[in-house]
Image (spheres, rainbow, N blue to C red):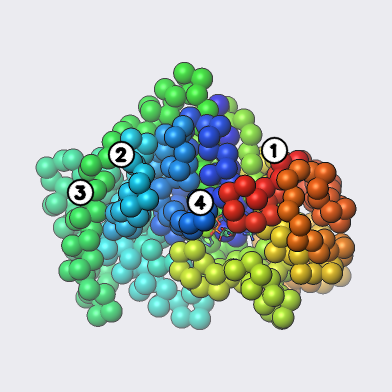
Amino acid sequence: MVDVLLGLQWGDEGKGKIVDYLAPDYDVVARFQGGPNAGHTLNIDGRRIVLHTIPSGVFHDRPLNLIGNGVVIDPCEFKKEVDELTQTGIDLNKKLLISQKAHLILPTHRMLDSASEKSKGAGKIGSTLKGIGPAYMDKTGRNGIRVGDLFSDNFRNRYDQLKQKHLELLGSAPQDFDLQKMEEEFWQGIEVIRSFNCVRGEYFINTQLHQGKKVLAEGAQGSMLDIDFGTYPFVTSSNTITAAACTGLGIPPTSIREVIGIIKAYCTRVGGGPFPTELTDETGELMRKEGHEFGATTGRPRRCGWLDLVAVNYTIMLNGVTKIVITKADVLNVFEEVKVCSSYRTGHEDSHQIPFDINTASIIPQYEPLAGWKTNHSMKSADDLPGSLSDFVRFVAEKTKTAVSMISIGAGRDQLVVL
Ligand code: GDP
Ligand code: IMO
Ligand code: MG
């Protein structure tokens, strides 16, 4: 059976930490979409490690880790990640497999991403500029190159043809890129990918399932960044919801058991696009400071605001969430009072739904105030939670009609209370 773990907000909910915590219970941890736009932070023995393409189960002995067909891989970024992990003493070759059907990000995809953002001017998406959009465009446009193609004789030709097509689209190679250097890194990265076990991922994972093995599917980004259901066009270029675990791994929907939805106790977003509960005042500034809210991939400051249960209920609906994990509760320690948005006021109406025109609608979030927990003491079990934090958890569970299974109270691996 498969459990799916994914973010219910705009990304960076702390998925990496929770996957790392749960991984020893699984035989396989598999990424199913996205690419190096993701930054999943793990804290291992006081060291901060950020994973972009590699699943967050690699720091344990038990699970094998699969990069699924739904992922787009940049060989340059992948090599950097492999080098960093190898330096920490991890033997990745034994525990990482790559689907032959995963698509590659070419250096010119990154150039196209940058050109697309520039052409949008003030309306830019705020992309991580990792080439994600252009790579998925080539996938759906049926021009893409896949990991399995690396082993064929005409790979170089295929690469040259696609690169040429991109350069024609661009008009000329943009001056702010050193394409030659990017290509050198690309070919080194290709050799690194070749050295891994590149498998028919869909057969691998279904064989595991038939043997009764347990799979954890690790989502990237967040459901509000989903290409269909997110705040389009301010979204990423893949489906990020539970359904994508099926298409991004080749597993049947009937194999999915639990869907674990991760939320922060507040909310963040990086890049452009609507964010109804955003706080542009000193409260938001304090959240950013306390939560160290700076992008794990780009270092950009993240926009901060109160927890938005209209958005969370929407993504619980889309994903079929069976359990919620709340992260970063400790970040709100500084507040006497915390707020939670339970409806949107548009005009004279209060609504519990995300409007189609969320990008342009004037939305006034309706908040319910709750007492802050103002606590610094360490908590190991549900009994240690201060009353106001228990009340917050109960409030979220009631308003979402979903059980809260864990609460994370620090970035460290064990700073987690199982409820
Ligand atoms: P992901 O993309 O969903 O894996 O999340 P990121 O790694 O981008 O961002 C989450 C950040 O919060 C990372 O820096 C984590 O180390 C950190 N973090 C995770 N859980 C907690 C928590 O409970 N408390 C605090 N203070 N930090 C946390
Ligand atoms: P993880 O997995 C937060 C955002 C970008 C931008 C938009 C499109 O770490 O939660 P893209 O590079 O995909 O073209 O960017 O999506 N974005 C993320 N925001 N966390 C992520 O991943 C993100 N991946 C993409 O900031 O607004
Ligand atoms: Mg992240």
CB contact under 8 Å: marks 1 and 2: no
How far apart, in angstroms, are the residues tagged by discs 4 and 1? 31 Å
From mark 2 to mark 3, how far is it between C-alphas? 13 Å
Q: CA distance from mark 1 to mark 2?
A: 34 Å
Q: Which residue is mark 3?
A: 191
Q: Which residue is mark 1?
A: 322
Residue drawn 44% across the image and 53% down it? 51
Q: Amino acid at mark 2?
A: Asn
| Residue appearing at x 17%, y 69% in the figure | 180
Q: Residues within 10 Å of mark 4 (few under 14, many from 20)?
A: few
Precedes in sequence: disc 3 or disc 4: 4
Labels 2 & 4 near each other (Cβ < 8 A)? no
Q: Earlier in the sequence, mark 4 or mark 1?
A: 4
Eye-nearest disc, 1 or 2: 2
- Element type where label 2 sits in the image: helix
In this rendering, the label closer to the viewer, 2 or 3: 2
Q: Which residue is mark 2?
A: 93
Can I make out residue 311 in this image? Answer: no
Q: In the image, is 394 to the left or to the right of 258?
A: right
Query: Against 126, is 207 above or below?
Result: above
* Residue 222 in view, yes or no: yes
Whole-percent x, y for residue 217 in the image? 52, 39
Q: Tell me the SS state at disc 3.
A: helix
- SS of the residue under disc 1: loop
Q: Residues within 10 Å of mark 1 (few under 14, many from 20)?
A: some
Which residue is label 4 attached to?
Answer: 45
Looking at the image, is mark 3 or mark 1 earlier in the sequence? 3
Mark 3–mark 4 Cα distance, whole angstroms, equals 31 Å
